[in-house]
Amino acid sequence: DAALSNIGVAGAISFTNVNTGTYFTGGLVGQASGSSTSSGSVLRNVFADVDVTVSLTNSGGLAQTQTTAGGLIGALARLSSLHNAYATGDVSNTGAGNLVTTGGLVGSTLSSSTGIQMSTVYATGKVRGVGSNAAGNLNLGGLIGNAAGSLALTNAYATGSVTSSGAIAAKYMGGLIGTLSSATSVINVQQVFATGMLSNSGGSIFRLGGLVGNVVNSGAGVKTLSNAYWDPVSTGQTS
């Protein structure tokens, strides 16, 4: 477990690789996770003004490779919490793997995780995702690329543009969250808004939403959104 508070960073991070694997990249932390079933990492009063660039290329394609990038944190996992935090840098994730996930603040909350909490957080940077795997998925969100597992998100917003390109099969893009998937867990999102423009080119399947791009309804999980808004003019999305 870890505790970080009253920390800010500025600059740029660039990660390039050609190998298979799972990679988490963040402006401040790559992955924050609990080491037990009773406690997790706590991050409070933290920020990053960091441009994050991830490039994973392979001419043969990387079927079992996942790249996850966030302006502040690559991934939040078991029992971790994030409070009074923000990211202002741009995040770009170019992947040849089967899953490319990018968020302005957090790339992903992991699906196997429980008890993740986020409150009073925001992101203002541009989010860009490029996928070349014709059988892969791409998740992009102004705040979170993929929200899964058990998550409570309160008092949050994103204002940066969200842009995707490439021949990757499926693209899920939201002004706040790219994909919302709770499976058997509970996700509660309240007091949130998004204003960033969404744009896409390429791909055979794509879903764009002013607030959430894609909602996965498999399993018995419960998803609740309340006091949640987006600007249909600035996002370019009516739904």
Image (spheres, rainbow, N blue to C red):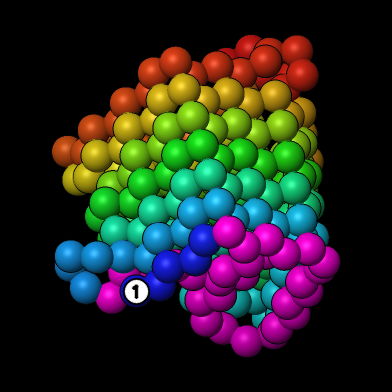
| Residue 184: percent from left, percent from top | 19, 45
Looking at the figure, which quarter contains the N terminus?
A: bottom left
Question: x%, y% of residue 128?
Answer: 75, 50
Q: Is residue 65 left or right of residue 226?
A: right
Residue name at image x 64 percent, y 12 percent: 238
Q: Is residue 24 visible?
A: no
Point out the stretch of residues depicted in magenta: 6-35
Find residue 216 and report its image quarter.
Answer: top left
> Relative to the observer, which residue lies in front, 51 or 209?
51
| The C terminus lies in quadrant | top right
Expressed as whole percent of the image width and height from the top left, the position of residue 137 reads 55, 54
Q: Quadrant of residue 190?
A: top left
Q: Residue furthest right?
A: 11
Judge from the rendering whether residue 125 lies leftward or rightward of residue 208; answer left or right: right
**Magenta-drawn stretch, dominant element (helix, strand or loop):** strand
Q: Residue at x 76, y 28 (%)?
A: 197
Q: Is residue 225 visible?
A: yes
Give SS at disc 1: loop
- Give yes or no for residue 7 being in the magenta stretch: yes
Q: Residue furthest bottom?
A: 19
Amino acid type, label 1: Asp
202, 90: nearer the viewer: 90
Residue under pointer 1? 1
- 138 relative position to 124: left or right: left
Residue plotted at (77% across, 71% down): 13
Total marks in image = 1
The one of 33 and 224 positioned closer to us in this rendering: 33
57 to 67, vertically: above or below: below
Q: Is residue 234 left or right of residue 84?
A: right
* Residue 12, horizontal then vertical, whole percent: 81, 68
Residue at horizontal 39 percent and vertical 54 percent from the top: 81
Q: Is residue 63 magenta?
A: no
